[in-house]
Amino acid sequence: MEQIIKVPDIGTNAKVDVIEILVKVGDKIEIDTPLVTLESDKASMEIPSSECGIVKSIEVKIGDKIEMGDVILHLEAEEPAVKIIKQDVESHEPAVAEPPPKVATNTLQTFYIPDIGSSASVDIIEIFVKAGDAVDIDTPLLTLESDKASMEIPCSIKGTIQTVLVKLGDKVKTGDAVLTILGEAKSEAPAPITTQTSVSTIQTEKIPQTIKTSMAITSSESTDTMILAGPAARRLARALGVSLSAVKGSGKKDRITLEDIEQYVRHRMQQPTSPAASPFSLPVSEFIDFSKFGEIETQSLSKIKRLSGQNLHRAWLQIPHVTQFDEADITDLEAFRKDQGTIFEKEGVKLTILAFICKAVARALQQFPDFNASLSPDGQSLIYKKYINIGIAVDTPAGLVVPVIKNACQLSIRELAIKMGELSQKARQKSLTPADMTGGTFTISSLGGIGGTAFTPIVNYPEVAILGVSKSSIQPVYLNNQFVPRLMLPLSLSYDHRVIDGAQGARFTKFLSSLLSDIRKIML
Ligand code: CAO
């Protein structure tokens, strides 16, 4: 049977350009196979197939202007591998392209990735369910991992899983279809993907599941997203590890085509590997075959470790670091904390020393705004932030993550303690969202619960300073002509020496130390 594939609703009535044709006559295609890339003046979008079969004829060519309803191609139709259609449980008869159900009934529904707080694609690193599994509201379905966080995605439909549409390692983003569930429909019509934490929509018509749109011109996400390239070219570039900013586009308005990427890779492969460019370049590390000396085992690093490693390495190489050491006499503070701690404990709040440190740091940042700034990309100016968002480094089994306490200076010590408890628990349960981890202006890394006397933390770029806190201990302090035992807290402040000079660094830690030594000063 012949099928006609037409341009679906592309969100505009205007004609758009055909800029890529991704299939040819004779190709065997499945549902969701990308067919063509269309481009308006704002975005490029890939049109996936709504049917499976063999391509008989293609009715458009590159440069054509087309609109919704125009014929793209003809298919010799085959039975689809996965049909996402409404299905009556009792009769098992497929209902094709019916209007949305009017009453609650068991229907085949599609579960989509809810709003994950970022438009970027993230990796699927765990799938907890399979076809045939019964699921309920909040049953964990998958774990997603971005460069910043891992998050578990809970189910929002009660029913039985019919098809899992994704596999480990796939990249998905908000709105992507994940699985189909035969369950109770509560909605009359497909609900839009909104900014709630857990959202699903009901797909009842035989229409393409996703129209993948890549913002072609206006985007602030990254340099690569501001370059003109279709989704297929972007996919190939990602697969080959090619940065689009390095590729010269040969298409209209310098658009990067699939051929441009292939050409770029061919060219790079032909280039000889050059020796170190200057005596100051980093020497190449020689790989040592450790198995020559004994048994070894190689384990890959977690994604969080790999990415935080890259960020730390970049910051270490690019920022001229200086670390200022100091200490604070927290004898009185600790007595006060212990005293108040028992009261807080009854209310289920753990009043940690870190909450006091965070409050004091927020106050110090108000006093020394350079520490709450960022250097402009050209290195010519300082960007002062009028908000104080403090990142707290949290050690988790998967690696180091830095959730951010927003507007820390407006929170009480009690509120800071509660917020810290919530964020570190979320971090350890892998449920931090990208929004929990962005927007920081200064970071605190506390190893005080573990031990050590001092360390040199690496500045969390694009911030300009980070405070390291080590374990407090009783020290003999010379006061009023005699040595007295005092509880001393070691502080290690690393800063970007391009922004902060040594005197400022010492003044900052002295101020912080004076606040912690007499906590009443925080109120001044
Ligand atoms: N001196 C002495 N004792 C300290 C202390 C300090 N500076 N800081 C914390 N402690 C004590 C606490 O009071 C607590 O004791 P009790 O259980 O008897 O009350 C104990 O150490 C454990 O504290 P904690 O670590 O659970 O809580 P916290 O608020 O101090 O820290 C958090 C929370 C999330 C920062 C911490 O758990 C963590 O992950 N730290 C590691 C951060 C890290 O890896 N940094 C390195 C970054 S660079 O690679």
Image (spheres, helix red, strand yellow):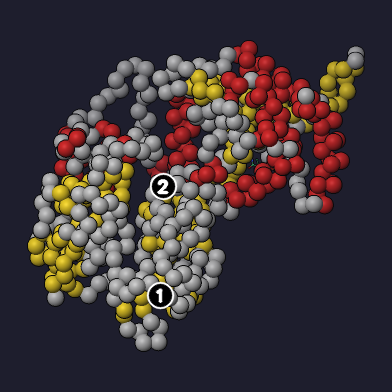
Residue 426 x %, y %: 60, 50
In the image, which disc is placed on residue 101? Answer: 1
Q: Secondary structure at mark 1?
A: loop
Residue 430 x %, y %: 55, 52
| Residue lying at the far front of the rendered structure | 13
Q: Does label 2 or label 1 sit earlier along the sequence?
A: 1
The amino acid marked with disc number 1 is Pro
Left or right: residue 489 versus residue 276 is right
At 16% from the left and 67% from the top, the residue drawn is 4
Quadrant containing the C terminus in the rendered view: top right
Residue 356 x %, y %: 74, 34
Measured in 3D between alpha carbons, the distance from the residue under mark 2 to the one under mark 1, in whole angstroms, is 30 Å
Residue under label 2, please give it.
119
Residue 340 x %, y %: 84, 41
Nearer mark to the viewer, of 2 and 1: 1
Left or right: residue 388 versus residue 359 is left
Quadrant containing the N terminus in the rendered view: bottom left
At 19% from the left and 34% from the top, the residue drawn is 254
User: Nearest the camera: 177 or 96?
Assistant: 96
User: Nearest the camera: 510 or 479?
Assistant: 510
At 16% from the left and 70% from the top, the residue drawn is 3
User: Nearest the camera: 456 or 440?
Assistant: 440
Residue 188 lies in what quarter of the image? bottom left
The amino acid marked with disc number 2 is Ser
> Within the displayed image, which quadrant is ligand 1 positioned in?
top right
Residue 50 lies in what quarter of the image? bottom left
